[in-house]
Image (tube, rainbow, N blue to C red):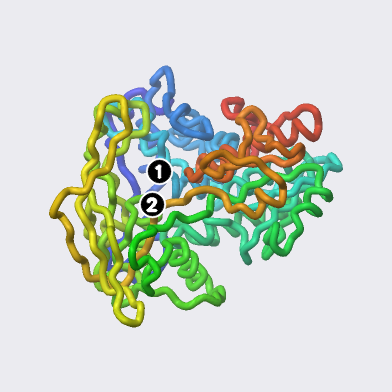
């Protein structure tokens, strides 16, 4: 695939970015589009490696060498058809995926891997620009009705696949607009929301119905919904946020990251919000949590005009290179520096927050930390231990808790009578994605726990196959590894 000697002739290149001082003035995407010829050169780097481990690295099983080869040869429309055969929304993954496929790239063993994610993004943008992505409603309807609860990537993928099978699909979204955390969690500087809107318009033209401000279990009766549909697919995400139950956690100025990010996205899009304004302008901000959500808080705080931004991570500072205990082609836990980190932040590792400090009026004034170390014992999980005499006081006006999520909300679980595991994920095996309730299925974070967008799309596609099989006795919808007829 690609050019036989391409990996020897071309070095890895990715998109350039607008200067920090320029991009901090707004919430627009700041990647500078690469020339097609440069992208085609990157496609040429894909090796004829015999066994494409990138396939196993990708939760969707994308046919990566195939579309890289088409890009190298300038056959962009064919590349788009191949890409969409396994991925409903490459415009999302091409911007937001951490690219486990690249970590599994054979070239990455001793060189820089192929820029799979950026090639993917360029393919889909070329497809939209040329009008190759159009509505393709099913030729006939089965008469079966399916309700999809949640319009994040899992819900959207399940809905599109089930609609392709000819079922009448309605997506229920509790917020005012479609997209779930794609819309209300991901900052616009990582993905502008018209990217969601253009895809949703195609889905509407294909016959999918969207009901917004429809909170199932609150203003939409779950039992009625179940009765009126032949199948229900739960794709509501793992949205219960992890707190930090320490002294002073109720201080004014301590916020959940998702409250901060969601409100800001509403502000950028001109939507109204009833809660009090959360702003980092002129404040000393500390973000607790070193993952993607923490990174998003850093970029957003700097755009607000924070005086300073500090990022705490309880884990030790990772190595830049792949750790010995995480060999290729597995996903390595190494140091990752995002574009938001490069916009201005002090990163502190091996640190734990012990208490928040507040004034007489309950306003946050600072916090107390200690250094920690992870003690490893053979055969046991590492244990966290406080380093003696390492306490430190930090002045701050705002703390954002980016500590991840603990599982699914209980409303749907209770109203549908669903079984959950110890992590509050809804029980459903990979063999059929079916819950203990006969016609109720589940996909995405509600089933597997907090995970990646690419996993959500994969789960939505897999679940759709099993729902279709449940309704019709068999299904032509693809499972991972099956491929699909090209369709965009």
In the visual, does 373 lie left or right of 169?
left
Q: Quadrant of the C terminus?
A: top right
Q: Tag 2's secondary structure?
A: helix
- Residue 187 percent location from the top left of the image: 44, 61
Q: Quadrant of the N terminus?
A: top left
What number is the disc on residue 71?
none
Q: What residue lies at 72% left-to-right and 36% top-to-bottom? A: 467
Please tell me whether residue 16 is drawn above or below residue 321 in the rendered image: below
State yes or no: discs 2 and 1 in contact (Cβ < 8 Å): yes
Q: Give the number of the mark in front: 2 or 1.
A: 2
Q: Tag 1's secondary structure?
A: loop
State whether residue 54 appears in this view: yes
Of all residues, the one furthest to the top in this rendering is 50
Q: Earlier in the sequence, mark 2 or mark 1?
A: 1
Please tell me whether residue 468 is drawn above or below residue 149 in the rendered image: above
Please tell me whether residue 253 is drawn above or below residue 338 in the rendered image: below
What number is the disc on residue 98?
1
Disc 1: CA contacts within 10 A as few (<14), some (14-19) or many (>=20): some
Q: Is residue 199 or residue 320 the one in the foreground?
A: 320
- Residue 183 percent location from the top left of the image: 53, 59
Q: Is residue 147 or residue 337 the one in the foreground?
A: 147
Disc 2: CA contacts within 10 A as few (<14), some (14-19) or many (>=20): some
Q: What residue lies at 45% left-to-right and 64% top-to-bottom? A: 261
Residue 376: which quarter of the image? top left
- Residue 400 percent location from the top left of the image: 37, 63
- Residue 310 percent location from the top left of the image: 25, 62
Q: What residue lies at 33% left-to-right and 29% top-to-bottom? A: 6
Of all residues, the one furthest to the right in this rendering is 143
In the visual, does 401 lie left or right of 87?
left
> Residue at label 2?
292
The Cα atoms of the two marked residues, 2 and 1, are separated by 9 Å
């Amino acid at each position: 695939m690609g050019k036989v000697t391409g990996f020897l002739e071309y070095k890895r290149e990715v998109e350039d970015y607008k200067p920090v001082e320029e991009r901090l003035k707004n919430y627009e995407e700041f990647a500078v589009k690469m020339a097609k010829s440069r992208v085609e050169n990157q496609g040429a780097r894909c090796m004829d490696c015999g066994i494409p481990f990138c396939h196993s690295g990708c939760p969707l099983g994308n046919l990566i060498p195939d579309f890289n080869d088409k890009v190298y040869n300038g056959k962009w429309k064919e590349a788009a058809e191949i890409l969409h055969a396994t991925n409903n929304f490459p415009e999302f993954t091409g911007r937001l995926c951490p690219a486990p496929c690249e970590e599994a790239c054979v070239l990455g063993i001793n060189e820089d891997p192929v820029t799979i994610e950026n090639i993917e993004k360029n393919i889909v943008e070329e497809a939209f620009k040329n009008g190759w992505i159009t509505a393709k409603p099913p030729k006939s309807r089965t008469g079966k009705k399916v309700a999809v609860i949640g319009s994040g990537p899992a819900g959207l993928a399940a809905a599109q696949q089930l609609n392709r099978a000819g079922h009448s699909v309605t997506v229920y979204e509790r917020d005012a607009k479609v997209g779930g955390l794609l819309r209300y969690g991901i900052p616009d500087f990582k993905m502008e929301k018209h990217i969601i809107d253009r895809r949703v318009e195609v889905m509407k033209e294909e016959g999918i119905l969207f009901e917004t401000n429809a909170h199932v279990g609150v203003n939409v009766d779950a039992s009625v919904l179940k009765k009126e549909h032949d199948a229900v697919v739960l794709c509501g995400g793992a949205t219960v946020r992890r707190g930090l139950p320490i002294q002073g956690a109720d201080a004014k100025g301590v916020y959940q990251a998702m409250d901060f990010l969601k409100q800001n996205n509403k502000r950028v899009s001109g939507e109204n919000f009833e809660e009090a304004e959360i702003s980092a302008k002129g404040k000393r901000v500390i973000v607790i949590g070193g993952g993607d959500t923490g990174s998003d808080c850093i970029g957003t705080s700097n755009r607000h005009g924070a005086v300073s931004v500090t990022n705490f991570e309880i884990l030790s500072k990772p190595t830049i290179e792949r750790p010995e205990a995480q060999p290729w082609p597995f996903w390595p836990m190494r140091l990752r520096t995002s574009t938001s980190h490069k916009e201005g932040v002090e990163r502190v590792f091996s640190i734990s927050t012990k208490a928040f400090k507040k004034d007489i009026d309950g306003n946050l004034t600072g916090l107390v930390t200690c250094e920690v170390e992870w003690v490893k014992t053979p055969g046991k999980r590492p244990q966290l231990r406080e380093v003696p005499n390492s306490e430190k006081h930090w002045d701050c006006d705002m703390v954002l808790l980016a500590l991840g999520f603990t599982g699914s909300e209980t409303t749907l679980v209770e109203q549908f009578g669903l079984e959950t595991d110890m992590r509050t994920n809804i029980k459903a095996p990979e063999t059929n994605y079916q819950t203990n309730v006969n016609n109720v299925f589940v996909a995405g974070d509600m089933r597997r726990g907090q995970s990646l967008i690419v996993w959500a799309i994969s789960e939505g596609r897999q679940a759709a196959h099993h729902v279709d099989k449940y309704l019709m006795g068999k299904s032509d919808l693809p499972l991972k590894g099956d491929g699909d007829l090209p369709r965009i």
